[in-house]
Amino acid sequence: MPNYNSKTGIPFGVIQGNNVQDLLDDIFTNGINLSFEDFKEQIKKELSVAIAGVLDQYTHHSEAVAESLAYDDILETLMDGGLCDYYECEGPEFYYEDGSLKLELTYLGGAPLIYVLESPFVTHCRPCSPCVPGAGDLDSPDEDGMLCYCLPKEKMPEDWNGKIEDAPVVEEESNETV
């Protein structure tokens, strides 16, 4: 089953990002832009290949020299020089942590979706559409619905009418609920 926490077995909760604008702003400001990090890793790989080609031509110790280079520093210098000035990404993915709350931001059809990957809180809601199988739709609370992770009450929309509970504690070694 996709879209659940493999340590706890609790499904992720998903909420439309525009319904929690302050949280969305926090994610953009303080989260890790996974898309940009992937982009930088790709640039470092391409730099490594290009530099290895030059070193193969002009030195007898190309592997040792290539391994000794600080590609993070080289990338930073190139970025300071404008390498990423035109970087664009439609629907970037972000990862965000706030204490024991772990979130991921993705886009579906242009809409920002916040996945609650781990939280000290759970709620009951309707399941998401087939586009996010196995996850709970935090925009549709339902006391008879599925259990899933949710945001703390203060981060939920003001008019949200679901009931938030403490998440069950799962022991690491046995994966049994306590």
Image (cartoon, helix red, strand yellow):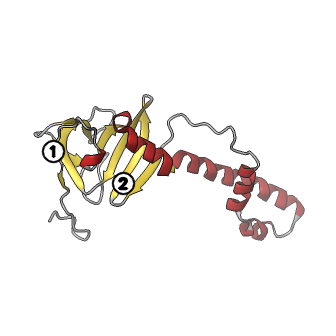
- Front position in the image: 1 or 17: 17
User: Is residue 158 among the parts visible in the rendering?
Assistant: yes
Residue 45 is situated, as x and y percent measured from the top left of the image, at 67, 54
Considering only order in the chain, which callout, 2 or 1, is on the residue closer to the N terminus?
2
Q: Judge depth for marks 1 and 2 and give the one in front.
A: 1
Q: Report, in whole angstroms, how far the alpha carbon at label 1 lies from the one at label 2.
A: 20 Å
Answer above or below: position of 92 versus 61: above
Question: At 61% across and 36% down in the image, what residue appears?
Answer: 88
Front residue of 64 and 27: 27
Mark 2 residue crowding within 10 angstroms, few (<14) / some (14–19) / many (20+): some
Residue receiving disc 2: 102
Mark 2 falls on what kind of element? Answer: strand
Give the side of residue 75 with respect to residue 89, left or right: right
Q: Quadrant of residue 111?
A: top left
Count of numbered marks: 2
Instruction: Report which quarter residue 57 is drawn in.
Output: bottom right
The location of residue 112, given as percent across then percent down, is 41, 35
Element carrying mark 1: loop
Q: Residue at x 74, y 55 (%)?
A: 77
Residue 31 seen in the figure: no
What amino acid type should be assigned to the residue bearing mark 1? Answer: Lys
Left or right of residue 55: residue 41: left
Disc 1 to disc 2: CB gap under 8 Å: no
Above or below residue 23? Residue 175 is below
Q: Residue 162: give x, y in percent of width and height.
A: 17, 40
> Where is the C terminus found, in terms of image quarters?
bottom left
Q: Which residue is mark 1?
A: 163
The amino acid beneath tag 2 is Lys
Residue found at the very far right of the displayed protein: 58
Q: Position of residue 170 (x, y in %)?
A: 21, 64
